[in-house]
Image: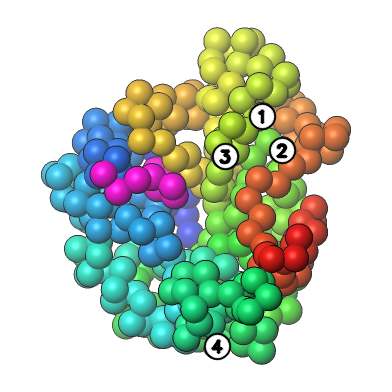
Amino acid sequence: MASPKIKLNNGNEIPIIGLGTWQSKPDEVINAVEYALKEAGYRHIDCAWAYDNEKEVGEGIRRSGVPRSEIFLTSKLWCTHHGRVEAALDETLANLGTDYLDLYLVHWPIHLNPNGNHPKFPTRPDGSRDVLTDWKIRDTWAQMEAVLAKGKVRAIGVSNFSERILEQDLLPYAKVVPAVNQVELHLYNPQLKLVEYLKSKGIVPQAYSPLGSTNSPLLEDETAGALAKKYELSPADILLGYLVAKDIVTLPKSVNPKRIKSNIEGALAAAKKLTKEDVEKLDGVAASGKQMRLIQPPWGVDLGFDNWPVRVQGRD
């Protein structure tokens, strides 16, 4: 089933549903990507250097037989690489076996010490994350703009950026407005103000963890369950369709062929059936006492998000 597309601020189009690959084991992700592209109609794959499975994602793409030109491929710049964007991108391109990305994102507005005690998560002696607090995110973004100008990527964007960081630290210095902002968005963390802000700036919101994370309570939610019953769909269909109905690019992750297929088909079916009143009802679920973030790395830095207390690894 083909996914509808949304236009980005540079005129390119992005399929509204993509396959997420976070926490997908390398051996499983080859088959998941191949199946999603070959059998389930996906044309959008979301990956990242930090997921440690880019090579396998690339292998899945090759095995699918779907031409690269038909696939929207996203990857992300990791936190230890902010000082060497082009070199990090070249490594990602080599891993994936492609000469361009459709979208390259700054994974977090955090620069971790590239010369620290770990390639991905360096820590200080007290156990807290080794964040370079004097680094300016605008210096990362200037390098992102440079790889865009070179044609190595077709669009650039951000991930896990709050309105405050965009307003204060990036947009005033940017020549290119980010095409997207990929953040945790779901029924219990709808971030309504942030989504409205992004749309006002021409930045497409993308949802990671749209079904929550492992053992998430979202699938048991009564409001979503009632709508699923009403429309003869599954709760997962409603959770995904709720985001798609709001023109949010949605990235469900699975390595199970049946769920990979049902995620795209169910999301599109639900998005068509949900009324304006249904969406408004779902928008109100978190505010009724169910607000919950599921992804909160202990960066020890205030990222400017609502409902995200600062946590410090080694101290909390």
Q: Which numbered disc, 1 or 2, marks the residue closer to the eye?
A: 1
Mark sitting on residue 217: 1
Between the residue at mark 4 and the residue at mark 1, the CA separation in whole angstroms equals 39 Å
Q: Which numbered disc, 2 or 3, marks the residue closer to the eye?
A: 3
Name the residue carrying label 2: 188
Name the residue carrying label 3: 213
Q: Which residues are magenta?
A: 17-27
Residue 305 included in the magenta stretch of the image:
no
> Who's the residue at 63% across and 79% down the image?
125
Between the residue at mark 1 and the residue at mark 2, the CA separation in whole angstroms equals 9 Å
Q: Are marks 1 and 2 in contact (CB under 8 Å)?
A: yes
Under mark 1, the amino acid is Pro
Mark sitting on residue 161: none
Corner quadrant of residue 72: bottom left
Mark sitting on residue 139: 4
First in sequence, mark 4 or 2: give its number. Answer: 4
